[in-house]
Image (cartoon, rainbow, N blue to C red):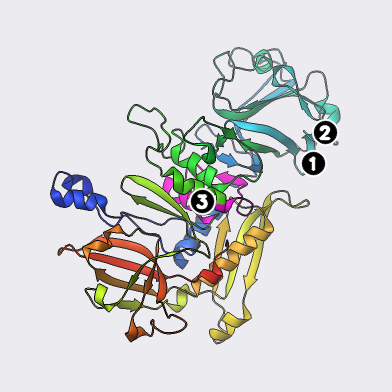
Amino acid sequence: MPFLAPVVAGIAAFAATAIGSFLIRLAISFVIGAVMQNRMKKKMEAMQRANRPSVMVNTASNNESIPVSYGQTRLGGNRLYTESTNGAGNENINSHLNMIFSICEGKVNDLEQIWFDDLIVWDVNDGGTIGANNELSGFISKFEPALSDAETHIVFFDGDDNQTSSSILSTSIGTPWTSNHRLRGVVYCGMVLNTNAEIYKGGLPLMTFTVKGKQIRNVSALPGAETYIGGADENPVDVLYDYLTNTRYGKGLDHNSSGVYTAGLNIDLDSFKTARTQAAGYYKINGVLDTSTQLYDNIGEILESMNGLLVFQNGKYILKLQNRSEATVATFTAFDILSPVAVQMPAKSSKFNRVLADYRNKAVGTNYNDDLIIVDSGTYLTEDNGTELEGRIRLDLVDDINLVTDIANYTMNASRYQQTINFDAAHTALRLQCGEIINMNLEEFGWDTAPYASGKPFRITQMGLNPDNSISITATEYISSIELIP
């Protein structure tokens, strides 16, 4: 399913005219994140991602973007501050190393683990606790003697917008770290490490953190009292709503001109609730979004993780999940069509018989490092005369091997069915909406007999207004059997 831009540009310039009012009612729609993308575009995206720093490294920058972590995942941190003191603010003695790592956007529910290189040194499920002054205790592994030293301190802050400065860091760092250094809204970890050449042989280890539960609104509870949830395996609809509405790193929808949050202002809540129910128990998100990436691409990444379609119509965003039981909303016959029907078959270059899916595997022994799933089809390979046609996708928000495999299979299957049609219809087609299913009952194409006795089903992907006020419709064939959810 290709990316679709808004079908009418410059609506605001015409808003005061009659035709402007007509255009505003038109389905101005774009489908982003449907798994099947243009092959070259996906290759370029994969290359760009490969060139970006891994989330499993420690960076040191004063302008590094802060990622958003949804569900549960493991990631490195950006060193915001590194300086040595005597542990009491004296910079002339370097017996203690002070480091502060920003991890992700807040607020999160839990810190699950801290890793030094490939070893867990703190685990909330293995005796790790967070006590007074946000200080961690209960360290494990070969680093434990140094970490349990009385002069060593590690603190964790969950990214609350009201969090206060760390007194432990202020004491060790001294004047440079005051009560105003609160890092509000940022999940961070501060470390005061006592010198121990025997333990830290070869220099400091790579430090990574497993966090869980970016707190986001529960869509099913809206527009009533705001209920925040957060944990592993987040429902992707809640994640999408958070990203669309967040004013710090997202699009800032459902906020009026004064910045006041109003549920349902720009988003069709009923469609999101329906999609949330459909997604529950199957689609789940555990991963990281790069906030330096364009909003459009990040929204597409979320939608790709649930095979979703986002439509903008009548001033609101509507969410649809592609599924096997979508109802047909209209049937077109030759009497309903005002132009010749143009049919375009998919190019060979956009068809796959083998798909590679990159993802971060959460399994023990892999621990959120990059992994690869390969799916292929001997049947498709035979249809392509033995020519291997390979596609590649990357799923940064999906860590479940079964779901990754399903999405990769869908990508391959969907690439085989990209027959597209274009035709003009009367203005009464204005009631239709991008993403909906229509039947094309046309004798000249054989779409009026079995297996298409009621017409061949297509999904509307684009609608536009012609100079004569007819509606131009573009649609792509809908094959219910390849969809992932009933």
In the displayed structure image, the side of residue 481 where residue 252 appears, left or right: left
Q: Would you call the spot at circle 1 few (<14 residues within 10 Å), some (14-19), or many (20 or more)?
A: some
Q: Residue at x 68, y 58 (%)?
A: 401
The residue beneath circle 1 is 119
Residue 148 to residue 384: above or below: above
The residue beneath circle 3 is 275
Residue 326: image location, x then y, percent = 48, 63
Residue 428 to residue 101: above or below: below
Q: Nearer the viewer, residue 326 or 377?
A: 326
Q: Which residues are magenta?
A: 278-305
- Tell me, for residue 143, which label it has, or none: 2
Please check the rendered image and state whether residue 351 is part of the magenta-colored stretch, yes or no: no
SS class, disc 2? loop
Residue 7: image location, x then y, percent = 29, 57
Residue 327: image location, x then y, percent = 45, 64
SS class, disc 1? strand
Residue type (three-letter) at the residue carrying disc 2: Phe
Residue 143: image location, x then y, percent = 82, 33
Q: Is residue 335 visible?
A: yes
Q: Earlier in the sequence, mark 3 or mark 1?
A: 1
- Tell me, for residue 8, which label it has, or none: none
Q: Residue at x 41, y 57 (%)?
A: 31
